[in-house]
Image (spheres, grey):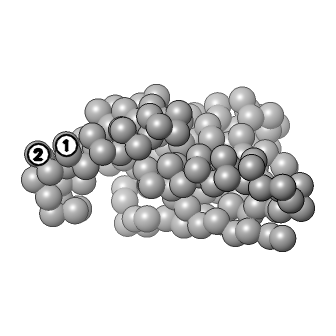
Amino acid sequence: MEIEVWSDVACPWCFLGKKRFEKALARFPHAADVTVRWRSYQLDPTMPKVYPGTSADMLVKKLGVGPQQLEAMHARMVGLGRAEGIEYRFDTVRPANTFDAHRLLQFGAACGRSDQIHAALFAAYFSEGKCLGEPGVLLDIGVAAGLDRAETERV
């Protein structure tokens, strides 16, 4: 069985869904017969390579909510994430265009490193305050996941 999952590494619900899916798959008696293919989907292809403001500013404007409502939304995600072993740090998120991150993901998938890179990109964005619009950040993630430095840099 092949399962295709469409996600963006800048989506907190996708990160949560990935964790929950992995747990469910681990309990599935035929998990060895399942192939998971991660597909790239950009939530906002118009996002600049590196967003000039804060994540909170961007989300208030994009979602049309007030700061207090955004804070409540983040608090809910933090609780849901904690239950799945995710440490969401919305105060450190650095919004960026995820096109190059998806290029890294697809290259990693071709090299058999999709899961490692996916996990590292989600952690970098939501927990470590790293900017996925910076080529050096993506290069470090790829190399740490076992990809060849020169090939990753070329991609």
Number of other residues with Cα within 10 Å of mark 2, as a class: few under 14, some 14 to 19, many 20 or more: few
Q: Observer-nearest residue: 96 or 124? A: 124
Tell me: residue 113, above or below residue 45.
above
Residue found farthest to the right: 33
| The disc label shown at residue 26, or none | none
Residues under numbered marks 1 and 2 in contact, where contact means CB atoms less than 8 Å apart: yes
Q: In this view, does 50 lie to the left or right of 116?
A: left
User: Residue 48, how many percent across, how many down?
Assistant: 37, 56
Q: Mark 2 points at which residue?
A: 68
Count the marks.
Answer: 2
Residue 131 falls in image quadrant:
top left
State the residue at coordinates (89%, 55%). 32
Query: Can I make out residue 43 in this image?
Result: yes
Q: Which of 85 and 120 is in front in this view?
A: 85
Mark 1 — residue? 71
> What residue do we see at 23% from left, 62% from top?
62
46 left or right, relative to 155? left
Percent x, y for residue 56? Answer: 22, 45
Residue 105 in view here: no
The residue depicted at 84 percent of the width and 70 percent of the height is 1
Instruction: Give the residue at x 73% y 54%.
Output: 25
What amino acid type should be assigned to the residue bearing mark 2? Gln
Mark 1: few/some/many CA within 10 Å (<14, 14-19, 20+)? some
Q: Where is residue 97 in the image (x, y as percent from the top left)?
A: 44, 55
Left-right relation of 77 to 3: left
- Name which residue type carries label 1: Glu
Residue 40 screen position, x and y as percent:
60, 64
Measure the alpha-carbon separation of dots 1 and 2.
5 Å
> Please, what secondary structure does the residue beneath circle 1 have?
helix
Q: Please tell me whether mark 2 sits on a helix, a strand or a loop.
A: helix
